[in-house]
Amino acid sequence: MKIKYVFANGDVSEVEVSEEIGAIVIDSRKAEHAQQEKERYHCYSLNAIDYEGDEYGRCEDYGESDAEAERRRQILNSCFSKLTETQKRRLILYIKGKTLREIAELEGASFQSVDESIKAAQKKFPKKF
């Protein structure tokens, strides 16, 4: 089976491949074409952007004052001070993206104990955190 490649500069090259590899290449090209067709309908014109409203958020959504940031730090420190060392350690690993199973393996603990520890730690934080 011959597979035809068209390069960006317009050059065309044909390569002889087995039927098995040819079928894989053809399937891959079909899948890529189907994906491009799907994406074609999800375009977003930059000329149509309003640059205001809910689409881009409100100005008050973008930052917080130094006083607000300091208050958040104080609340966070207060919440962490109520946790046990184990809860702190596990919660930090969880926040960094480790799964409960990975934390359990790292600490040589059971999945259930890690899960309970993190849930108990989360209950000590206000809802906004």
Image (cartoon, rainbow, N blue to C red):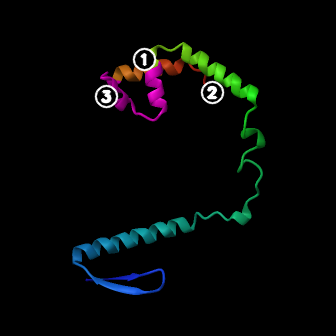
Q: Residue at x 43, y 87 (%)?
A: 11
Place of residue 47 in the rendered image (x, y in percent of width and height, measured from the top left): 73, 66
- Report how far apart the C-alphas of labels 2 and 3 lie in the structure: 30 Å
Place of residue 99 in the rendered image (x, y in percent of width and height, measured from the top left): 40, 33
- Report how far apart the C-alphas of labels 2 and 1 lie in the structure: 23 Å
Q: Residues within 10 Å of mark 2 (few under 14, many from 20)?
A: few
Q: Amino acid at mark 3?
A: Glu
Q: Residue at x 41, y 33 (%)?
A: 98
Q: Is residue 56 left or right of residue 20?
A: right
Sooner in the amino-acid sequence: mark 1 or mark 3: 1
The part of the chain drawn in magenta is 88-111
Please tell me how many numbered marks the rendered image carries. 3
In front of the other: label 2 or label 1? 1
1 w.r.t. 26: above or below: below
Asked whether the beta carbons under mark 2 and mark 3 sit within 8 Å of each other, the answer is no
Q: Is 89 contained in the magenta span?
A: yes
Sooner in the amino-acid sequence: mark 2 or mark 1: 1
Q: Amino acid at mark 1?
A: Thr
> Mark 2 sits on what residue?
128
Sooner in the amino-acid sequence: mark 2 or mark 3: 3
Mark 3 element type: helix
- Report how far apart the C-alphas of labels 1 and 3 lie in the structure: 14 Å
Q: Is residue 114 left or right of residue 121?
A: left
Quarter holding the N terminus? bottom left
Name the quadrant containing residue 13: bottom left
Name the quadrant containing residue 19: bottom left
Place of residue 106 in the rendered image (x, y in percent of width and height, measured from the top left): 33, 27
In front of the other: label 2 or label 3? 3
> Mark 3 sits on what residue?
105
> Mark 1 sits on what residue?
86
Q: Nearer the viewer, residue 1 or 63?
A: 63
